Amino acid sequence: MSLPPLYALRAFEVAARLNSFSKAAEALNITPGAVSRHIRTLEIWFDCELFKRQGPRVEVTEAGRVLAAQLNEGFRSIEWACRAFKSENHLLRLKAPSTLTMRWLLDVLSAFRDTHAKPTIEIASVWMDIDTVDFSLEPYDCAILLGNGYFGEATESRLLFSEWLIPVCAPALHESARQRLTQCCLIHPSADRRDWRRWLRRTGFFPELDMSSGIVFDTLEQAGLAAMNGHGVAIADLHLTLEALDNGLLTLPFREAIATGDGYYLVWPKNALRKKNIEILLNWLCDNIPVSPDVNIHYLDADNKRAD
């Protein structure tokens, strides 16, 4: 065995905390003699004295205090883990990108709560330059991530909807953006300007456009807000911009939307403990994916073929 008996460790931790064998026995519902024998087992195991015995009185040694402090923390973690597992059988902890959360997921989960008493969805909206999740280290049961569908061998995933990029701007800039994009301020949702580069390369439009200028943000959400306020032309995810388009806050100066090859996936660990709850959430998300706008969009797939 690589560990001494756990019941002996527990008896010692309680006795050290209460500084009394009799009080520890009462707390653990065993006899003081049993507590004494457990502690003696540990002293033999560790080959050191854990308590000084002075007749009926006992006092924990310095070595005992060090061990007791570490055991106290360990048993507390175990207790919290068991309590959380018991109370959270109907809780799903979901990780999701910030823009997706603001533009789509919050409304979808609000409707979910109105119709489902369980499971309870606890969402963490997280900024991620590259969407990732490590279920062995992060406190999530599932995640919605943007990617190509592969998120590690220890995971399973299901595509919710694909990413389509298209330029957007405030209605006041619509005509000038369409006719003179080279003279407009470009709004980039990432520091590497990758989304504008992909759209320009795939459409073949404006080969002379200077990509070194413009306004750079961290997220699609920030770039979209800047575009709504008339600060320039942003590149956006079409499906995550539908509400702003429907409300007239944004408009499409170009009708060409390009597929990046990525999409938003629900991801969960293999052999997930809450698989049934994940399936309930997955079905709801699939029933509420953003619907393509009822406008004339030219969809260019990964091979630059029209996918209208």
Image (cartoon, helix red, strand yellow):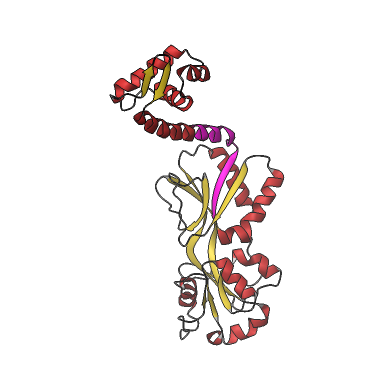
User: 43 left or right of 301?
Assistant: left
- Tell me if I can see residue 217 in this picture: yes
Q: Nearer the viewer, residue 260 or 117?
A: 117
Looking at the image, residue 35 lies above or below residue 173: above
x%, y% of residue 127?
51, 60
Which residue of the protein is positioned furthest toward the front in this rendering? Answer: 54
Residue for point 55% across, 67% down:
220
x%, y% of residue 42?
34, 22
Residue for point 46% across, 67% down:
302
Which residue of the protein is positioned furthest toward the left in this rendering? Answer: 47
Q: Is residue 84 magenta?
A: yes
Q: Nearer the viewer, residue 287 or 268?
A: 268
- Tell me if I can see residue 289 in this picture: no
x%, y% of residue 40?
35, 18
**What quarter of the picture does the C terminus occupy?**
bottom right
User: 60 left or right of 114?
Assistant: left
Q: Is residue 195 magenta?
A: no
Q: Nearer the viewer, residue 80 or 94?
A: 80
Q: Which residues are magenta?
A: 79-96
Looking at the image, residue 198 lies above or below residue 14: below
Looking at the image, residue 193 lies above or below residue 94: below
Residue for point 60% across, 42% down:
280
User: 146 left or right of 280?
Assistant: left
Residue for point 67% across, 68% down:
244
